[in-house]
Amino acid sequence: MQPTDIEDPNFFHQVVDCQWACPAHTNVPEYIRLISQGKYAEAYMENRQSNVFPGILGRTCDRPCEPACRRGRVDGTPVAICRLKRVAADLAGDVTEMLPKSPAQKNGKRVVCIGAGPASLTVANDLLPLGYDVTIYEASRAGGGLMRTNIPAFRLPEEVLDKEVNAIVNMGATVHYSTPVMSLDVLRQANFDAIFIGSGAPRGKDLELEGRTAGTANIHIGIDWLHSVAFGHTEEIGKRVLVIGVGNTAMDCCRTARRLGGKDVKVVARRPKKYFKASPWELDDAEEEEIEILTNHAPTEFVIEQGRLVGMRFDLLEWNEGATKSNVIDSVLIPCDDVILAIGQENAFDWIERDLGLEFTADNMPIVDGKTMQTTLSGVFMGGDAPWGPKNIIWAVAHGHEAAISIDNYCSGKLVTERPADGQNLISQKMGISEWSYHNDYNPSPRQQMNHVELTKRFQELALEVELGYSAEQTAVEVLRCLNCDVQPIFKASSCIECDACIDVCPVQCLTITSGEGTLDDLRSRLSAPSTKPDEPVYISPLLPQTGRVMVQDENICVHCGLCAERCPTAAWDMERFVLQLSYAGAATMKGGQ
Amino acid sequence: MPSIRKPIIPLAPLPRNDLGLTIRAYEGSMSTLCAGCGHDSITAAIVRAFYELSLPPERIAKLSGIGCSSKTPTYFVSGAHGFNSVHGRMPPIVTGANAANRSSIYIGISGDGDSLSIGAGHFVHAIRRNLNMVYLIENNGVYGLTKGQFSATADIGSASKKGKANETPPIDPVSLALSLGASFVARSFSGDKAQLVPILKAAVEHKGFSMIDVISPCVQFNNHPGSTKSYHYVREHELREIEQEYLPPSIEITANMSVDDLVKVRMHDGSVLAFRSLPNGYDPRDREAAISYVAAARKANEIPTGILYIDEDAADLHDLAGTTETPLVDLEFDQLCPGSAELIRFQEAFR
């Protein structure tokens, strides 16, 4: 077996499961430690560096980090990473002085962004400090994109949104609100050096069934309806509401309907619950607000009486195992006053002329390079929901960072494919004998539960935030649940005397000294604790000096407690903090730090 | 001393032995020995062997004298009985405890100083009586607790940490035990659990005195070039010609397991000790052969390891004394102490 190449930043990066899973690669363990030290502003800035909108994401992120979290493998529930992000944002105080600033001396390059959503704002955030002149066109009368129009204020308070959007706009972006771009061709004639399209997936899917036209006054497209509520155009809805669809938009629609007068709100799904697209916690929140969720109902007809919608007819389905085939077993009528359709979103590019050289696929989706974000039209880049349909905010941010690198390359005459490499830094955490600069003991506490505003109060005020955030006590416990996956046991084979001290003291038996012969599968079969996750890496040392065997660490089960390093007589093991030096526009490795 | 106790991580359900206990039930306190001490590896081997044998913790008695080695019992089986005695006086305490309660499992942990200097007299008599116990010597050739003086097992020519070579001939616990007629003599190395764990299991099941000399490097004072008890030296000079496998009673010996040169020793509880690989013509039941083998290896600067000698038929302390099968602690008072009239009658027999 070849020893593991730990010079490659990807090796330790993949061990930090949360950071690896985060599209923007937020350094989660570091910001959690900063919170535990009471350094909220620093924790906020650590977040902002990679995910740009900590306050917003601390409430609304889809949290790809949490299912990946090592703690989930240990006791079944991940660290409340997202909740802690909100703690950092809520307690950060005034961070104005720490925010990046646009230099007085500009570089003379002009970039235009279409849409003021998270992708465009990230591009602006990355390019403004480099001296770019950034112009943004936004169709609505305020910035934020879907963060403003589709996420209800009871989940994301307006002031949190404004603060983080303004932090970027105030860096010096020129924003034209209420100015939809009607033609890419016309915009190109304005001679910008680069164009970024972050226009989202703004068109909600419709459901063409019998009665659709006749009932149109009471049939709403989910995202349009939420948009209308967000800007105060819609203030009420009928008492009996059906929401069709089970994604997160459906959850926002049903909960908003409860606040606008809906008493009997039902969410209706075609498929069984385990196939729902909504995040589990959003489903829980909806159910807590007395919203009934009906499964196995396929809509067949809007029922109209005397020119008015009075209900919807559904086929009741029976699914096979795996929910690939269904039989209709009954037909049911559910009476209602209003229907909200939340069955998906589509992209809309009627403003992009098809003869400019920006190519589309057969399904009418633009062709965009997944790494550089460049379209087939030189100098035109795209990101967020626009190129590949609805994802979530954190993906839009990740796209924005990549697009900014491309735009910077493009404007400096470099190839967009010349991506700066990520770097790494490894810093020993040893403070003394058996003393570490991180909390290395395992804390057995369960995940802290979020406190919510009482149910009765919630429906009185539309914008009242439901989640109260963690208390100081909850925060103090939750931060200690983090296993500090970025603090890596690093092994120096040449110092090892094979005394077995590390192997004997390891609480999870993740260490093995064995022959380095044979394949990786052979080696895995010889580990002290059975290897259960073959996709998680093992760390294999060079040959040990005394017996020529190898030291193997099974990363899957290591809890980074540091006992191996404490019991090592020769300091062959050390606990070192891995810092991923992510590349951003303008510098090969702007990020670093101690 | 580690900063934290070894935490219980609910990662995956740990396997359980026949008593329903996990291996964690056989652990003790965190070790306060130096990091990298061979004794800690021996502790881990004991934990593993006792767990795999499903020994009930409350039936185990762990005893020791004084020295680094004698701290070891604290670090395994918290639920066992323990006695940390005076320097070198562990064997008499075991003798007394065993006389009173023959049903317990006795393990005495000693060191080269505790057994072969101050406690040598007690050690040899415990062998002579064939006391039913596991007697484990954590042998590092040095007085670690008093900062590195040579002990009675330091080889001639072995250098101290400051470079001075030892000139006094050593006592070899294996040769000593063999010459005194010990019924179970083994040697192993703390850095080789694959060998030490089966030896420990056989030692527990052996009825009589099981002496295991475990070379256990002192990382602090005797792990330097020039030492003959360092990790490096032992690995270079270890002679692993004797390999044994401990087969618990539940495992049936099948035909395909018997190869021609396999020597099988049936132990008193029905388990079998199978010797797989032996030097040519070696029989671990032949004491004279063992003595000459050990002597020849010694001359060649080799350290033979494995179970070097075993006699399952030797009478132990209770056989020799003709005591009752029932442990004395379980006898009713009037049986244990039949009264003055019976004492007088007994004394009359000597007139």
Image (spheres, rainbow, N blue to C red):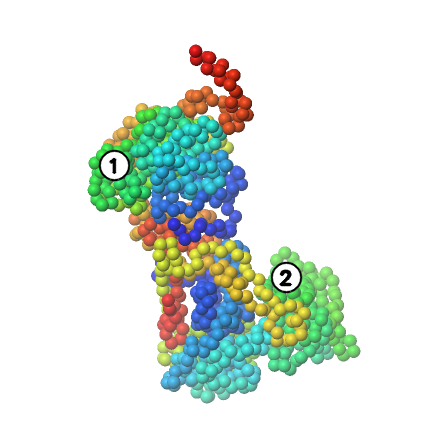
Compared with A497, A146 (above or below) is below
- Which residue is at 50% across, 80% downward? A166
Q: Is residue A366 visible?
A: no
The local crowd at label 2, few if under 14, some if 14 to 19, many if 20 or more residues have their Cα within 10 Å, is some
Given residues B17 and A124, the one toward you in this image is: B17
Residue labelled with disc 1: B155
The span from disc 1 to disc 2 (Cα, nearest Å) is 74 Å
Residue A425 — which label? none
Looking at this view, name the residue that lies furthest to the right: A306
Q: Position of residue B330 (x, y in %)?
A: 53, 28
Residue labelled with disc 2: A273
Q: Position of residue A298 (x, y in %)?
A: 68, 66
Q: Position of residue A117 (x, y in %)?
A: 52, 78
The local crowd at label 1, few if under 14, some if 14 to 19, many if 20 or more residues have their Cα within 10 Å, is many
In-image side of B343 versus A432 (left or right): right
Q: Is residue B56 visible?
A: yes
